[in-house]
Image (cartoon, helix red, strand yellow):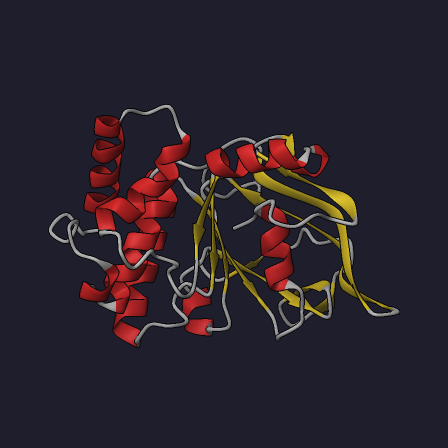
Amino acid sequence: MTGQDAPGGSGPAIDIRSVCKSYTRGQQTVPVLQNVSFHIAKGEFVALMGPSGSGKSTLLNLIAGIDRVDSGSIFVSGADITTLSESELARWRSRSVGFIFQFYNLIPVLTALENVELPLLLTPLSARERRKHAEAALALVGLADRMDHKPSELSGGQQQRTAIARAIVTDPDILVADEPTGDLDRVSAGEILDLMAGLSESLNKTIVMVTHDPRAAQRAHLVRSLEKGLLIDAGNGAEGGNGNADAPLHS
């Protein structure tokens, strides 16, 4: 499955063009990403893999508009997010990106429903409309009967389902997931991956997931691997800037 042939039809949802990123540590400049280019089709479920320090989490943050590139461009749904001002980028993130974290990032004193409703506070929806949207998102992840429970009253898998409901409640263009199964047992992890795959397939959500777990990566449509800031083809060495060869896990 290539980016052009993947679910979602015309044009990539995410188009990464010659992206470079480095950080400064004292007097030293440390390159993190080096001329990375590839695209992700709408509805694709992509896993980013690589050893610690390979740049995968940095790339995820750049795609989500949390961090800035040094050079290159990132287009999401046709918009070059690297040209946006900080205020424009914040507005874009609130509308266009759903975040799924390893440790859920739920607010302990709020119920599942209230946690899911939080992103909607930035919208013009009424309180009644916000509740309706949050209830629908929780029902979609199988937690219709746990809406009034606080995080401490939920299992790890249920907390991550709540976090996924929060991520999708605004109907974002893309979902970014940073080690979403890293704190879960194998059964719960499998259920979360089933849910994420279902969001890609049934709702045509574009998902980019960072993971160290090959079993988690196998649930994605394709895997992109990074090593020392370079995009590599599976087993074929560094691609450098020519990062358009996909490494499919499913035919």
Identify the residue shown where x is 30% and y is 75%.
186
Identify the residue shown where x is 17% and y is 49%.
147
Residue 28, by quadrant, is bottom right
Question: How far across and how far down the image is residue 25, in percent?
Answer: 80, 69
Identify the residue shown where x is 37% and y is 60%.
104
Measured along the vertical axis of the image, is residue 22 above or below residue 184?
Answer: above
Left or right: where 71 falls relative to 160: right
Please state which of residues 90 and 18 is positioned toward the viewer in this rendering: 90
Residue 75, by quadrant, is top right
Identify the residue shown where x is 59% and y is 41%.
14
Question: Which residue appears farthest toward the left when viewing the image?
Answer: 145
Measured along the vertical axis of the image, is residue 160 above or below residue 19?
Answer: below
Please state which of residues 235 and 192 is positioned toward the viewer in this rendering: 192
Answer whether residue 170 is visible to the viewer in this image: no
Left or right: where 196 falls relative to 3: left
Question: How far across and how far down the image is residue 74, in percent?
Answer: 67, 41
